[in-house]
Amino acid sequence: MNRIILAFILLSATPLLGLAQTSQPDMTVFGYKLGEKIPIPECPCKIVESKQVGNYGVLSITHFKGYQYVAGLVAPVSTTCFERLDIDNYKVKKSDQLNPLPAVTNGIIKVRFAPQDAPAKEMCPLGSFNASIEDSKLTGVTFTIYTGDADNILEALKKKYGNNAVVKPYTVQNGYGASLNYYMAVWAFPNLGVLLESSMHRSLSEQFGSVAIEIPKKNAPPAQNQRKL
């Protein structure tokens, strides 16, 4: 179940969900259109050699070569490109031969913006987003935001998707009585769901929230038919 559908279930008790817009929403996110192929290359790779030591007291060392992205976790990329989240699972079949990896047709990839292509820092502070790919097409985008910027991003999303969002405040409290206030905002279209979480509420000092913009899965049942929590 994707995050948008889960949010619909959590908010299904409120009558405001019926006010969600029914007009055709803008299907582009950061210039990429949901439902179409994402036209960016894979980030450059290099070959790295690793070794694996045997387990259970058996002395054996296996050397193998695999793929690694040239740019590090924080180093900028020169061209906007994508990275596989499972790059460590790919092994070099021939010694020192950097063959192209198979196309990503299903799964989640990480898109890294080159500095000249990056959105406003407030909207995408990490300079990257995760893209869901189904049948080689972009079906969802999720990205991290700063909790302190959530209210401004909410207003930006209202300008794009309309004012009829369902906004639900929440409070999380720890065992010492300290509390954290945050909110969810959901836009429900027949062919698109948008979810803003002002905080990931993992701790009382949480600094990050998130935004998810997704095409609803075809096999997901309507939210109103789900059992309420």
Image (cartoon, rainbow, N blue to C red):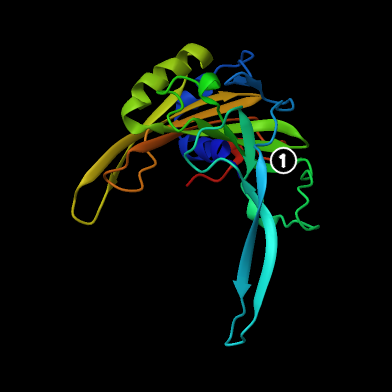
Q: Quadrant of the N terminus?
A: top right
Q: Residue at x 45, y 25 (%)?
A: 166
Helix, strand or loop at mark 1: loop
Q: Is residue 75 visible?
A: yes
- 173 in relation to 27, above or below: below
Q: Residue furthest bottom?
A: 57
Q: Is residue 163 visible?
A: no
Residue 179 image-quadrant placement: top left
The residue where tag 1 is placed is 219
- 27 in relation to 140, above or below: above
Could you tell me residue 229's position as x and y percent? 47, 47
20 and 147: which is toward the camera: 147
Q: Residue furthest front?
A: 96
Give the tally of numbered discs.
Answer: 1
What crowding class fits label 1: few (fewer than 14 Cα within 10 Å), some (14-19), or many (20 or more)?
A: few
Q: Residue at x 61, y 44 (%)?
A: 69
Q: Residue at x 33, y 35 (%)?
A: 182
201 and 7: which is toward the camera: 201
Could you tell me residue 156's position as x and y percent? 44, 16
Could you tell me residue 100's position as x and y percent? 78, 43
Q: Residue at x 42, y 23 (%)?
A: 121
Residue 111 image-quadrant placement: top right
105 and 93: which is toward the camera: 93
Left or right of 101 in this view: 88: left
Residue type (three-letter) at the residue carrying disc 1: Asn
Left or right of 108 in this view: 184: left
